[in-house]
Amino acid sequence: MPLEAADARILAALQEDGRLTNQELAERVGLSASPCWRRVKQMEETGTIAGYRARVDRRKVGLGVLAFVRVKIDSHSEAEARAFEDEIQRLDAVVACYSLAGSADFLLQVAAADLDAYAEFAMSTIRRLPRIKEMETAIVLKEVKPLTGWPVTPR
């Protein structure tokens, strides 16, 4: 679906503040209320807008450590990869997981209370998953530009 300029403005505004009323959103993006509402509803129906969430400061909920874990698995069969993905889905500490091309098979983003909690999770959970061949952890020292939304431009 092509993304029109008005849709891009709507998405950018909602990513900045998902609690805007339709009237506030319409004023911010330069539309009247009815066309703005119709565009938002259409983007919700097509899945372009996948939902609305609160952005939570992880430190204020006790998650002081953020780590990225590169994982290689033993086999590259589709069944083995799917089994690994299914296991990862059940781990609350893994806040994001990406399948990669390159030197690793997966990149996990893990949040933990502190280094001890991360170490325990890594050693007793991640390393114990079946099919793990290798893992490497990078601890985040500083979030320079955390994800706050996707860049949206008309196409």
Image (spheres, rainbow, N blue to C red):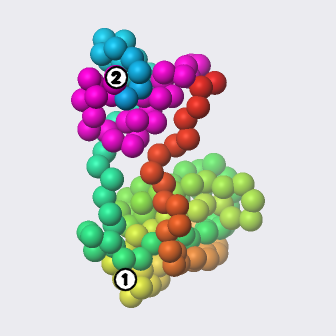
Q: Residue at x 55, y 19 (%)?
A: 4
Q: Residue at x 42, y 55 (%)?
A: 89
Magenta stretch: dominant SS? helix
In the image, what residue type sits under mark 2?
A: Ala
**Who comes first in sequence, dot 2 or dot 1?**
2
Count of residue discs: 2
On residue 26, the disc is 2
Q: Is residue 130 visible?
A: no
Q: Position of residue 42 (x, y in %)?
A: 40, 17
User: Who is closer to the viewer here, 131 or 91?
Assistant: 91
Q: Secondary structure at mark 1?
A: loop
In the image, what residue type sits under mark 1?
A: Asp
Above or below, 18 against 56 in this view is: above
User: Circle 1 is placed at which residue position?
Assistant: 114
Q: Secondary structure at mark 2?
A: helix
The region drawn magenta spans: 1-27
Q: Position of residue 154 (x, y in %)?
A: 59, 26
- On whether residue 49 falls in the magenta region, the answer is no
* Label 2 Cα crowd, 10 Å radius (few <14 / some 14-19 / many 20+): many
User: Who is closer to the viewer here, 123 or 79?
Assistant: 123
Q: Residue at x 57, y 77 (%)?
A: 137
On residue 50, the disc is none
Q: Is residue 77 visible?
A: yes
- On whether residue 26 falls in the magenta region, the answer is yes
Mark 2 against mark 1, which lies toward the viewer? 2
* Label 1 Cα crowd, 10 Å radius (few <14 / some 14-19 / many 20+): few
User: Who is closer to the viewer here, 126 or 141?
Assistant: 141
What quarter of the picture does the N terminus occupy? top right
Q: Quadrant of residue 29?
A: top left
User: Who is closer to the viewer here, 49 or 94?
Assistant: 49
